[in-house]
Image (spheres, rainbow, N blue to C red):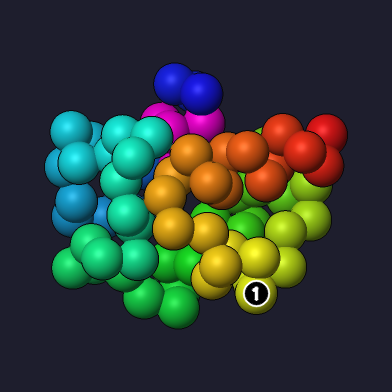
Amino acid sequence: MEEFIKNFAAQWDETDLDEFTPECEFHELEEWSSLTGLAILNMIAKKYGVKVAPAELKAAVTIKDVYDLVQSKL
């Protein structure tokens, strides 16, 4: 999960790495936008070879939720 969090955090420009924990409710971060969401979906597809639908990402509350979703598709 640590590597996933680092990859997830790399999609953000201004948010400190310390903000990103498994329990982080990423939609609540000030920097969150639809473009960040697209970057996350792209990162997941490239690094993990998994397709996550935008609605699935929107339904996720925490980074752990996204991680678990990716793991379920591997």
> In the picture, residue 18 is in which quadrant?
top left
Residue 2: % across, % down: 44, 21
Q: Is residue 1 above or below residue 7?
A: above
Q: Is residue 27 left or right of residue 16?
A: right
Q: Is residue 51 left or right of residue 61?
A: right
Which residue is label 1 attached to?
55
**How many marks do you count on the picture?**
1
Q: Is residue 53 left or right of residue 21?
A: right
Residue 30: % across, % down: 18, 68
| Residue under the point 43% across and 66% down | 36
The furthest residue to the top? 2
Q: Is residue 73 above or below residue 12?
A: above
Q: Is residue 46 visible?
A: no
Q: Is residue 6 magenta?
A: yes
Residue 68: % across, % down: 63, 38
Q: Residues within 10 Å of mark 1 (few under 14, many from 20)?
A: few
Q: Which residues make up the magenta segment? A: 4-8
Q: What kind of secondary structure does the magenta stretch mostly adopt?
A: helix
| Residue under the point 44% across and 45% down | 63
Q: Is residue 52 magenta?
A: no
Of residues 59 and 57, the one drawn nearer to the viewer in this rendering: 59
Q: Amino acid at mark 1?
A: Ala
| Residue under the point 53% across and 46% down | 65
| Residue under the point 35% across and 66% down | 27
Q: Is residue 59 left or right of residue 62?
A: right
Which secondary structure lies at badge 1? helix
Quadrant including the C terminus: top right
The furthest residue to the bottom? 34
Of residues 38 and 64, the one drawn nearer to the viewer in this rendering: 64
